[in-house]
Amino acid sequence: MFYWIGTGVMGRSMAGHLSRAGHELKVYNRSKEKGLICAEQIGCLCADSIKEAVEEADYIFTMVGYPQDVEEVMLGDGGIFANAKPGSLIVDMTTSSPSLAVELGRKAEDKGLRMLDAPVSGGDSGARKGTLAIMVGGKREDFEEARPLFDTFGKNIAYMGEYGAGQHTKACNQIAVAGATAAYTEAIVYAKKVGLDPQRMLSAIGTGAAGSWQIDNMAPRALAGDFAPGFFVKHFIKDMTIVKEEMEKRELELEMLEAVLEMYEDFAEKGHADDGTQALVLHYED
Amino acid sequence: MFYWIGTGVMGRSMAGHLSRAGHELKVYNRSKEKGLICAEQIGCLCADSIKEAVEEADYIFTMVGYPQDVEEVMLGDGGIFANAKPGSLIVDMTTSSPSLAVELGRKAEDKGLRMLDAPVSGGDSGARKGTLAIMVGGKREDFEEARPLFDTFGKNIAYMGEYGAGQHTKACNQIAVAGATAAYTEAIVYAKKVGLDPQRMLSAIGTGAAGSWQIDNMAPRALAGDFAPGFFVKHFIKDMTIVKEEMEKRELELEMLEAVLEMYEDFAEKGHADDGTQALVLHYED
């Protein structure tokens, strides 16, 4: 019996892959309505509370929004830690704080539970196609046990080390995404400003040293004026803030990352927090 | 008869492809010694001066360092404009100022010469393999005439518009390279700081939304401590400065680009101007 918590853009696609692979699944969402829609799409049950189903689950997957949501779902009253059966394996796939992942891993051990931090990369399209990269921290034997489940929606599945190592790797991923996102955004802005055809510009530069997944997959959405969230601006700000905080603890400033974070913070303040990250092209027009 | 001016890291590979395709070639370098080494490698003649050979040339290719070098080679005493025969086609492949490209295009017309701005992307490895992206500005018929020559060392060959459009496209390329370079650099710095294996981190993130040509091709050099210039820090600073100046004229600030430029300027001041761009990882250690 599997339990999937969080049925947003990413979670519902990933849960669908698990279900289609033949795994009996129950979903839960803080917003019951969203949970029901997802359950109907997948063809599985929807739980009324975390407590209700978590007692029967062998594997519990979570994909929620912010580190504080992870904390609440794990440690809150009626949460997973209070109700999961001993020995069950909890897999948090939310992009969250590495320090929190370490803390949760240790607390899980104290409770006789098992825990992996396993954030993903590849966006909404990767979740739909089942081609996500998955970066995993925790005990290696738990990773090996979960690997066939990851296989149902992932492609590049990497064990990275102890608790938090998955989150740290995802932090690196988000640093690289920040650079690549600002890269195509500012290239488009420049092209428009000087009168180049931005589509032809991207075709000309995309095959060489400037090429990136972001240019291939996200820049076309930006150019088409499709600002629907594959990945929310507000969640990207959360991820970059995690990076900044982890580096501040170590007295290091990542200059590009902080410049991009600042841009997105300005952009969110102007009312774009719920747009997709590709909407940043508007930042230069506002 | 072809004439190739500038036999640095990029120029000598590109000239070699032209020569192997059967085109009779003469090279020239400001440093005679470098010119001779290149001529020997390729098996072609080496000229003593620009004037000497330019009178016979139908096609004149230039690949020098800075916009001021382009200006000198084109407009200086004993330069190309003063000595080229009427109707010859000058192709400047240096990454240079778009405004200068417009100026040179017009001056060439006044002199009965023809001119293309055709900067490239793909680095030293693209030049060696003959897989460069080439972005071309100027008259379309001149582009069509030169295309078979570009084919000998290029792959994605794009006509972008009037004089300067090639340089503007290359400027966009360099914006994207700046983001992607800072991206893998700061990801590596983060990984090292938190104790992740940077090689495994790059393998984990390289296939997803963070993926880029820079991660695949340049990050491994940075990790291996190979800081030899495929692309010089000082030339990257030149390119980013061109972007900044073009945007300043249009009262626009590209925040990521300027953050990366500032980083590289600091880095060059610390004595790294002649390193390859991948050496930026050292910026965070100095």
Image: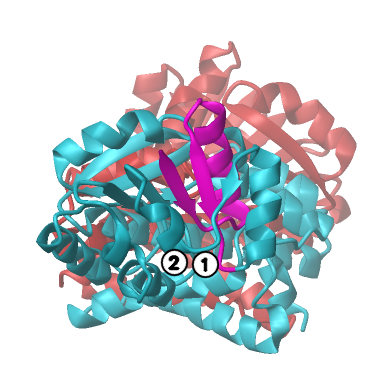
Chain colours: A red, B cyan
Picture coordinates of residue B164, whole percent (x, y): 22, 59
Viewer-closest of A180 and B260: B260
Which circle marks residue B73 in the picture?
Answer: none
Asked where in the image residue A168 lies, by quadrant, the reply is: bottom right
Indicate the quadrant containing the N terminus of chain B: top left, top right, bottom left or bottom right.
Answer: top left
Chain ID at mark 1: A
Residue at 51% x, 68% y: name it.
B236
Would you call the spot at circle 2 few (<14 residues within 10 Å), some (14-19), or many (20 or more)? many
Residue at 66% x, 28% y: name it.
A150
Residue at 35% x, 75% y: name it.
B76
The answer to whether marks 2 and 1 mark residues whose Cβ atoms lie closer than 8 Å is yes
Viewer-closest of B207 and A74: B207
Residue at 19% x, 46% y: name it.
B87
- Tell me which segment is drawn in magenta: B1-30
**Label 1: which residue?**
A240
Does the rendering let one see residue B211?
no
Residue type indicated by callout 2 = Ile
Which circle marks residue A237 in the picture?
Answer: 2
User: Which element is circle 1 on?
Assistant: helix
Residue type indicated by callout 1 = Met
Q: As displayed, is residue B6 above or below residue B272?
A: above
Picture coordinates of residue B195, whole percent (x, y): 84, 63
Would you call the spot at circle 1 few (<14 residues within 10 Å), some (14-19), or many (20 or more)? many
Q: Are marks 2 and 1 on the same chain?
A: yes
Picture coordinates of residue A283, whole percent (x, y): 24, 69
Viewer-closest of B75 and A39: B75
User: Which element is circle 2 on?
Assistant: helix
